[in-house]
Image: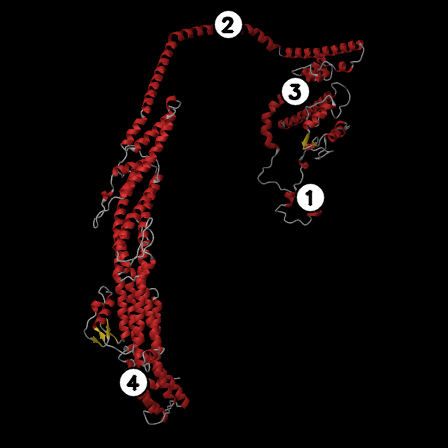
Amino acid sequence: MATTRTQGDAETGNGQQQQQQGNSRKHSTASTGGILSGAPAASWQSCYYCTREHFKSIQEFVSHLRNRHCTREGGSFVCRYGFNGVCASLPLDGVSDRDYDAHVAKYHVNQLTREMPPEWGVYSAAQNLPAVLNDPSRGKQSNLFTKKWGEQFVERTHVPASARLPDITHADFAVYLGSIGKRYRWHERRQQQLERDIPLENGTGGGAIGSPTHLSSVPDIFLKSQLQLHHAPTFKQVFPDLMQSSDSSPATHQQTGRQLQEQLSQYLDVVEVKIAQQVSQKSAAFFHAMTTQHAILAEMEQAAEQVRQLRSALAQLHNSSVVDSFKVLRYAKRRQHYNLTLDKLRLMATVHKTQPMLQLLLGTQDYVAALDLIGTTQEILSAELLGVHCFKHLPMQLSEMEKLIDKMLTTEFERYAASDLNRPLTPEGLLETDSVCAEEDKLVAIVMGLLRKQNFSFVQSYQQEAIATIRAIIKQLLIEVLSRSDSDQEISLTGAGEQALELTLPEWIALLQRSSQALTSILERIKAVVGIMQQTADAAVGAQDTVNLIDSEAFLSASHHEQLRSQLQLLLQAVCHYCHERCANIVSPQSLERSSASEQELSQLSDIVEQFSETTKSICGVSSVPLQLALKVQASRYAQRFHSEHKHKLSLLLDQERWRQVDIPHEFQRIIERMSSGDYAKPEGSLISNGGGNPVLLLEGKQPYALVSASLMLIQMLYEYGGSAHRLPLLASYHSRNVVDLLRCFNSRSCQLIIGAGAMRVAGLKTITSTNLALVSRALQLVLWLLPRLKEHFHTMSGYEAIERDYQGHIKEIENKIHGIVSERVAAQLEAWEARPPIPSQTFRHISRHLVKLHEAIAGVLPEAQIHEIYGVMHRNFKDRLREQLLKLNINNNGGPQHGVVTSELTFYMETLRTLKALPSPQLDNGILEDIWLY
């Protein structure tokens, strides 16, 4: 119940407050508008939107609208006197100055009725058309263009209560109302007391609100902090009737002045009454202040006396202790200044001795110390002696001295490089040692100074000097070689002597021999100098494992050290590459093409190039290509010429071959044995002897090969290829390709001569016999046996699989040719055979004769397995042809007379095969007597 009453009282109090606030607003509006006249308030006397602005004239109102409620866009004026800054009569349209004045006078100054601006509420919000059109939850709207824009454009949906918000009831505010109730009741009692006191004040002398004795009857102009009567508007407001009645009589002026004086006296009385009321309300505090004023004055006098005593004590303390202490501090400061001045003078004396010290250091070639001294002096001049007049020219002199030292270092380095590289070479057979670098200390001093200046161009200078020295050495060697040559051709060397010359291959080899020795000595010198440069750079960067070559701290950065190291490495590589390139381009390619190198010359050239390449690689760390390419060109020419000669020789031998079996000399047997073991070290000439030979070639001691003379020459050629590749590994890649080409030539040419019957035209053979075919097959089988060993010797053979397939196909084709010849003859005999006595018939006698002749032709040439394979094919063909003949003759396995004749004939046929042993033993039984009737 207490809580309910408190709430009801609070609601009642709130209602009373709202009613009083509304009354006060109405009263203030009425009093503001009716200060000077009792007429209704006009529209120009106050601003709708500036609540504290009130105007006495139309001009002030118009000026206020132009300054506060108008925007200028270019030469146009836009009226903003309206709700949300939009004028209802002229919304967002710009007009001229004259039209704007007319608009303000018509719609704002002379407006008869005042409508309060609408207050903004939640229903004043407008729909956002883009948000409605792009709502992803609504999709495509079909009736979009048939709706009217407004509040009903979007259907309203019921939003359910959130489950996260609690249900608020009156009980939730019980604690708050209980805590605020006591203070609220005290506030109500205070408010009621004030309401009772206000009528009493009004009745006793203050007057009611709006009466002449109330403070609101005094105009606002008199209540401002400043009243400036010299301003015309202010004077007009204070004396309004006086300004309007300037043409009246003196009596009228006197009456007006009297009225004004009475009115001002009335205003003064009102103010005095209000002051008296305030003083009466604060009288207790005023009298309390007056009574305590004497006590305060006494305390102030006592405090002033204490301050005077304190100041006297401080003065005595200052004279007795502080002054002397300050003197001690001042003297100590002065001594410090004297010491600083002395140090500065000593520093100036030291700087004054800089130039003589520089001369002394340069005389001892201590360039790093000289440069350090210049740098230190420049730092001192810029930091500690800045502004000293006697040293104003010294920084410029030091800069010039630094440039001079840089130029001196460059010149000294070039002079040293030229003198070191152009020293006499060591005698032949002696190598340059580590002491090849002359005046090492001088080089270290020069390089250290260049590094201190961070001048890394000396690397390029040394490289150019080294290349010029190499060019001069090769030119001198060319002159010596040409002077010793017996040729009558006149050759002139002009310029640097880098043009290619017409030299023979022996002259080029001799020149390379001498050039490699001379260039090796020069490269050793260059390597030694570069090593010293690298050690100097390591010492300059402060490496731990290097010899200390400087007395000062490390001055070379890690990035510059790495840059210098790479430049020195590139210098060695460039010089070595130039040596190779120059040696390779001494002789013109045309002159080398005209001269054919022998294997001995090529071996000598290869040894020179390999030795020189290894030397340069040990110096610079990388392999150089130009001289290797020149060697490979010569090797390629030699290999091509070698192959052309052997290939032409093989073609001539094949064309002249009679394809008859020959005896195998012992030297060819030894060649095969060495090729089988991969031994190509012994030359071919040492294997040739005049002893006899064997009828067949034995492979691995048990496989006999009957060969023709062309096969023997092919074996010798293959051994020569292998021996050449063994002696000159440079030729291995060329010879491996050429061996494949030679074998392909042998295969294709033998196929043309035997299978294509070309030997009948070239060699004059009357016919191609089975013996010829068997000898060719055996020669091809020998090559197939040699192919894996050749591949192992040459390490790689491009086209190995292809040549192996070609040879196997050729052998198969020869076998088909052999058994095809006999099979055709057997088929011709069987076509004329009839199952009738005598037995054996003449047909089977002829068949047996063909089998015997074939066996006699190939038995001494082909191996037994291959003979079995050939006869096996012929045997299958025989059975197929015989079955066809039996079907043709309508002979069946019925035990009749014809069946007996067939059995007898087949028995004679099988007896011939058993005699020849032409088939494997399991196939020589009488199974054919049963198989022949199986269709």
Residue 569 placement, left or right of 6: left
Disc 3 versus disc 2: distance between alpha carbons? 47 Å
Query: Which badge, 4 or 1, comes first in the chain's sequence?
Result: 1
- Residue 852: assigned label: 4
Q: Please tell me in which quadrant of the rendered image residue 543 appears.
A: top left
Q: Which-is-in-front pick, marks 4 and 2?
A: 4
Mark 2 closeness class: few <14, some 14–19, many ≥20 residues within 10 Å = few
Q: Amino acid at mark 3?
A: Gln
Mark 3 closeness class: few <14, some 14–19, many ≥20 residues within 10 Å = few
- Residue 301: assigned label: 2
Q: Amino acid at mark 1?
A: Phe
Query: Which badge, 1 or 2, comes first in the chain's sequence?
Result: 1
Disc 3 versus disc 1: distance between alpha carbons? 52 Å
Q: Is residue 394 visible?
A: yes
Mark 1 closeness class: few <14, some 14–19, many ≥20 residues within 10 Å = some
Q: Please tell me in which quadrant of the rendered image residue 390 appears.
A: top left
Q: Is residue 933 visible?
A: no
